[in-house]
Image: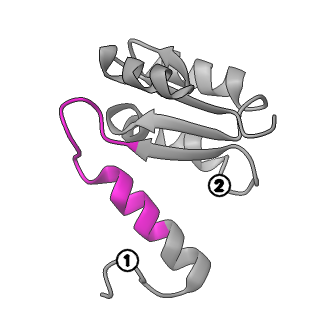
């Protein structure tokens, strides 16, 4: 599993990651995304998932929070960010450090 990275998302927007050596897993909906993440979780250290899918899978993705790997990171999709990924990151940082170092609130 050394350093393997994947992205799960819908649309052709994720295909640009293929040029950077990231394994791409295109999916049509949340159910396929959940099945795909479950299937690849033991083989990849970092899994990016587009925000539109991640926010609907938040309960499923929480199970990975307590494990060292894989690290699952929500990223904006091809239409832009809704702020979900940043909120997840902010919450995780506050939980880990006890303070908000990103926004200083």
Side (left or right) of 4 relative to 72: right
From which residue to which does the magenta span run?
Answer: 75-91
Quick one: label 1, few (<14), some, or many (20+) residues within 10 Å? Answer: few
- In front here: 71 or 88? 71
Side (left or right) of 88 relative to 104: right
- In front here: 46 or 63? 46
Q: Is residue 90 magenta?
A: yes
Quick one: label 2, few (<14), some, or many (20+) residues within 10 Å? Answer: few
Q: Quadrant of residue 104?
A: bottom left
Image location (x, y in percent) of residue 49: 46, 35
Residue on which the image places disc 1: 102
Question: At 31% across and 80% down in the image, what residue appears?
Answer: 103
For mark 2, give the secondary structure: loop
Residue on which the image places disc 2: 65
Q: Is residue 46 visible?
A: yes
Side (left or right) of 83 relative to 22: left
Q: Is residue 66 magenta?
A: no
């Amino acid at each position: 599993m050394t350093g393997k990275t994947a992205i799960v998302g819908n649309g052709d927007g994720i295909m640009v990651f293929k040029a950077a050596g990231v394994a791409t897993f295109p999916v049509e909906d949340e159910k396929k995304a959940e099945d795909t993440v479950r299937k690849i979780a033991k083989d990849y250290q970092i899994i990016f998932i587009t925000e539109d899918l991640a926010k609907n899978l938040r309960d499923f993705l929480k199970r990975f929070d307590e494990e060292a790997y894989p690290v699952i990171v929500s990223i904006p999709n091809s239409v832009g960010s809704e702020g979900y990924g940043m909120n997840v990151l902010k919450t995780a940082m506050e939980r880990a450090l006890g303070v908000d170092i990103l926004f200083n609130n």
